[in-house]
Image: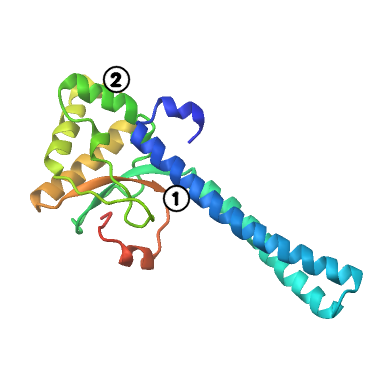
Amino acid sequence: MSSLEKEKVAEVYYRRHRIHLFRVIARMAFFLAISGVLAGTNLLHFLRGINDTAQAGIAAAVFGAVFLFLCWATYQSICNLFQVRVLPYFERPVGQSDTWLSGENYLRHSKELDEIAVRLGVQPLSKFASGDDMIRGESLFWFSPDDALRTLERLLQTDVTTSLPSAVVSDLTRIRDSLRLACSKSVKFCFLVREGTSASGPEMERRKGSFF
């Protein structure tokens, strides 16, 4: 999210995304620096004929390849980080949830939606945000879906939806439907800031909750 979008995004979501972004960039910068120094040192030894030049040349090539791979991986990771959305995350699977590829439009209008919710006398949706259990230093908090569902039902009434973009209404509808499932099964939930659209099986197995 760019700095201009900060005016449209609820503070809690914006802050978590910036922290996630900083951590990924810092981690990748560290590995780039290490591989770059090792590649450069061995290349210098090779060019100057210091010690075993063949061994230094091979090492320079290997570390150089690693450095270039990390450059590509860093670029891909940063691009992925800017595919941001907010997803409902459940204490246990609810089934038939259709929210995995939604949430971007909600996120980019979340500040406005919070302001509308306050005017309507219901809880702002960002109040149900939590830290991600897969990110070190963040704490996971569960909420009853009832209050959030009440907010979504109110936001999706005709007098409100006429002023919202259709893509935002679509996101809210999907989230509402998933929270209805959670309510029917007494499953707690929270909202997580999620970067990227892909997920691995091992990640999902390690998670305490479920996106589905």
Q: Is label 1 in a helix, a strand or a loop?
A: loop
At 29% from the left and 36% from the top, the residue drawn is 170
Q: How crowded is mark 1: few (under 14 residues within 10 Å), some or many (20 or more)?
A: some
User: Which image quadrant is residue 44 in?
Assistant: bottom right
Whether tag 1 and tag 2 are in contact, CB under 8 A, the answer is: no
Spatial separation of the CA atoms under disc 1 and disc 2: 29 Å
Q: Where is residue 64 in the image (x, y as percent from the top left)?
A: 73, 65
Q: Name the residue under label 2.
A: 163
Please say whether residue 64 is visible from this viewpoint.
no
Relative to 134, residue 116 above or below = above
Relative to 172, residue 91 above or below = below
Relative to 115, residue 9 above or below = below
Q: Where is residue 182 in the image (x, y as percent from the top left)?
A: 15, 49
* Number of numbered tags placed on the structure image: 2
Please say whether residue 138 is visible from this viewpoint.
yes
Q: Mark 1 points at which residue?
A: 196
Residues 170 and 185: in front is: 185
Q: Position of residue 212 (x, y in %)?
A: 25, 55
Amino acid carrying label 1: it is Gly
User: Which image quadrant is residue 108 in?
Assistant: top left
Q: Where is residue 180 in the image (x, y as percent from the top left)?
A: 14, 44
